Image (tube, rainbow, N blue to C red):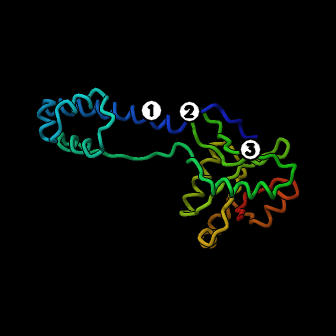
Amino acid sequence: MLPSMPVQERRADRGARVAILLHRRLGQELRALRRQAGLSQRRLASEVRVDHAVISRIEAGGAMATTLDVYARLFAVLGGRLSVKVYPEGDPLRDEAHLRLIQRLRALLHAAINVRTEVPLGIPGDLRAWDVELAVGVDAVALEAETVLDDAQALERRVALKAQDGGVDVVQLLVADTDRNRRILRAHREALRARFPLDTRAAMAYLRAGRLPPAGAVIVL
């Protein structure tokens, strides 16, 4: 079985906390570079055309309204270059289309199959979760639902990493039945077949009969 859902910090609140930490870190780096350059806060502020009180607040980690434009200009004057990168930390919140896709699958399942949604990987501090867990008795498989396909190979790598980290052997890929998604699947089906060897008909035959597919599948609904 996949682990039960723990009490988690709201994602928006976590993002706000990260923003505070980033502002503090940037303020510390700004102070260090400014001192190395031998510039006063007033001189640096003059170069960037901001009030010197802004520099003071930034270095104290209290200038939460500071824009990336200001940060980039400040660091450029001090011989640095601001760089921003987003690291994957959790799955995104899903929209109504995503929920409807999962509901279409639930309506087709045998009553013997138990369904749980948003099931975490069970790794402390890791926000990632499987969209769905399908279980029969003590056996379970994970399922990822996708309403819009884009980069099929990137999707396969993401699922593979989650499966590896979460200790899951079998993952089902549920895809909304749209012209775009079918075109992408036709173009990349063979590349996906190693992880998802079963197709919709084969996987749904198991699920309608109250059994879990023995291998990964691409299920188009």
Compared to residue 105, the image places residue 43 above or below, namely above
Compared to residue 58, the image places residue 121 above or below, namely below
| Point 23% across, 42% down: residue | 80
| Point 49% across, 35% down: residue | 14
Residue linked to disc 1: 17
Q: Circles 1 and 3: CB distance less than 8 Å?
A: no
What kind of residue is marked 3? Arg
- Left or right of residue 38: residue 94: right
Toward the viewer: 169 or 15? 15
Residue 20 horizontal/vertical position (percent): 39, 32
Element type at mark 1: helix
| Residue 116: mark in rendering | 3
Residue 47 horizontal/vertical position (percent): 13, 41
Q: Circles 1 and 2: CB distance less than 8 Å?
A: yes
Residue linked to disc 2: 9
What kind of residue is marked 1? Arg
Distance between mark 1 and mark 2 Cα atoms: 11 Å
Q: Residue furthest top?
A: 60
Label whose residue precedes the other's in the sequence (3 or 2): 2
Label whose residue precedes the other's in the sequence (1 or 2): 2
Compared to residue 149, the image places residue 45 above or below, namely above
What kind of residue is marked 2? Glu
